Image (cartoon, coloured by chain):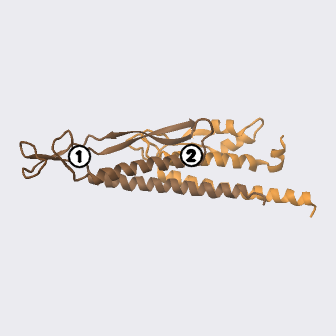
Chain colours: A orange, B brown
Amino acid sequence: MSIENELFGIHGKALALRSQRMSLLASNIANASTPGYKAQDIDFDKALKEATGDQGSVASALEKAMGYRVPVQPSENGNTVEMSTEQTLFSENAVKYRTTLSFLEGRVNTITRALKGE
Amino acid sequence: MADKPMNIFDISGRAMTAQLVRLNATASNMANAGTVSGSAATAYRAIRPVFQPVTEKPGVSTVNVQKIVSSDTPAVKRHDPGHPLADANGDVWESGVDSSAELVDMVEASRMYQNNVQVLNTAKSLLLETIRLGK
């Protein structure tokens, strides 16, 4: 186990995955008016399990948990981006990124205090 | 762009550029909505950008304007013998622009632009918070 894993536990990997998912959702929003574009997303629970497992890495977890979004109402030009879905998931992801960040911050503060011997 | 990995600022930034091109095309079409020409061939045709996804790796992709095409909305023939541009039959051609379609396109482009700005803002504030981690 690397030092990073021991220090931050699950939250280090979770932050990396959240950040990758943010790029993914941003890609979907960016391509909202591109004909034929298929929206993609990751199954976060599955990705996190994969990344925190033995020999798991963030890159391979992303690859395994990636999937295409099933649209509620498919549009005529083959684009499967639905703005309401993407925006909701994007903001949810942002809030959860912040949550993970505050867990990490707590961890960093604890270590810092232990190092200083306060 | 190919030598370094694409980040969220590239993704949303390029999408904003693409939407701006679309907005410019719409503005050109609206500006030429009432223009008159002496023949069907020289009449103004509405122009439209063609969007194409640029994928770096699965799931991470931005958008590019591949080309700009002229639409096939036909020019409208109008009989107006008094017009200086009228041909031998006294006909002129009005530009092939569907103004209501252009208006809809304009609203959509501006909404999409706003969405991308919102994504950038959120990403920026999250990254700034991450930088401040542990301070």
Residue under the point 46% across and 43% down: A80
Q: Label 1: how many residues lie within 10 Å, few (<14), some (14-19) or many (20+)? A: many
A78 left or right, relative to A24: left
Please name whichever residue, B84 or B28, is drawn nearer the observer in this view of the structure.
Answer: B84
Q: Which chain letter goes with mark 1? A: B
Q: Position of residue B116 (x, y in %)?
A: 51, 53
- Identified by mark 2, the residue type is Asp
Tell me the residue at 6%/43% (across/down). B89
Q: Which residue is mark 2?
A: B10
Query: What is the total number of numbered labels drawn onto the structure image?
Result: 2
Quarter of the image where the N terminus of chain A is located: top right
Which one is earlier in the sequence, the residue at label 1 or at label 2?
Answer: 2
At 26% from the left edge and 50% from the top edge, which residue is drawn? B98
Please determine whether, in this image, residue B89 is positioned above or below residue A113. above
Q: Position of residue A111 (x, y in %)?
A: 86, 56
What residue is disc 1 on?
B96
Residue sitting farthest toward the bottom: A118
Q: Which image quadrant is residue A27 in?
A: top right
